[in-house]
């Protein structure tokens, strides 16, 4: 008995996952005009975010709960930590030889700026959901 069919299937999956990861890194580099290292730091978080949000949408639709509606502001807000390396590079934070140069950093590249965006998205998103929910109910 030969196991070449089983082995080639596993190899195909591994090559496919590797190609997908490289495609995500290339997309990040082209879309946000960042260096290889920054895209490489961002890609794992983005891939995990895509898997979690995709699973949330899938199970939210299957179970017919309000998971998609009530989870949307959190999913959007979680994009801030996912894109943290890109935001820091775009804001002007540079690391060279283990030293961090952040003289003239824009507000969105700092920790408080990212926290402000994260909690702002949550407050506005859940505020809108609460407003729409109370507007459409009769109690």
Image (cartoon, rainbow, N blue to C red):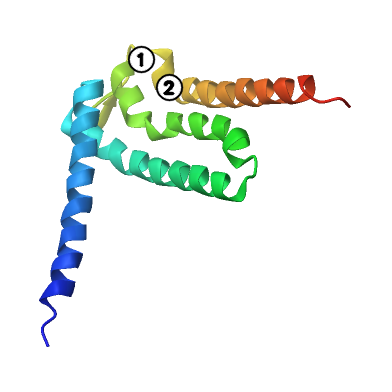
- Mark positioned earlier in the residue sequence (1 or 2): 1
Residue 101 image-quadrant placement: top left
Q: Which residue is outermost to the right? A: 139
Quarter in which the N terminus is drawn: bottom left
Q: Could you tell me residue 121's position as x and y percent? A: 56, 23
| Residue visible at 60% across and 27% down in the picture | 122
The dot on residue 32 is none
* Label 1 to label 2: alpha-carbon separation: 7 Å
Q: Is 66 displayed left or right of 110 in the figure?
A: right
* Whether label 1 touches label 2, CB < 8 Å: yes
Q: Is 99 displayed left or right of 66 in the figure?
A: left
Neighbourhood count class around disc 2 (C-alpha, 10 Å): few under 14, some 14–19, many 20 upward? some
Query: Is residue 28 or residue 129 the one in the foreground?
Result: 129
Q: Which residue is outermost to the bottom? A: 1
Does the rendering let one see residue 96? no
Quarter in which the C terminus is drawn: top right
Q: Could you tell me residue 107's position as x and y percent? A: 43, 14
| Residue visible at 47% across and 24% down in the picture | 114
Residue 30 image-quadrant placement: top left
For the residue labelled by badge 1, is the local secondary structure a helix, a strand or a loop? loop
Pointer 1 residue? 105
How many numbered callouts? Answer: 2
Pointer 2 residue? 110
For the residue labelled by badge 2, is the local secondary structure a helix, a strand or a loop? loop
């Amino acid at each position: 008995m030969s196991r070449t069919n089983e082995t080639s299937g596993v190899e195909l999956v591994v090559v496919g996952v590797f190609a997908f990861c490289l495609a995500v890194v290339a997309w990040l580099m082209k879309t946000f005009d960042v260096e290889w290292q920054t895209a490489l730091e961002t890609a794992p978080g983005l891939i995990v975010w895509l898997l979690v949000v995709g699973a949330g949408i899938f199970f939210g639709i299957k179970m017919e709960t309000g998971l998609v509606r009530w989870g949307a502001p959190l999913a959007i807000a979680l994009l801030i930590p996912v894109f943290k390396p890109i935001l820091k590079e775009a804001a002007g934070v540079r690391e060279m030889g283990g030293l961090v140069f952040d003289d003239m950093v824009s507000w969105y590249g700092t920790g408080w700026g990212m926290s402000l965006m994260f909690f702002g998205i949550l407050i506005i998103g859940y505020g809108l959901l609460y407003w729409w929910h109370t507007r459409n109910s009769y109690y």
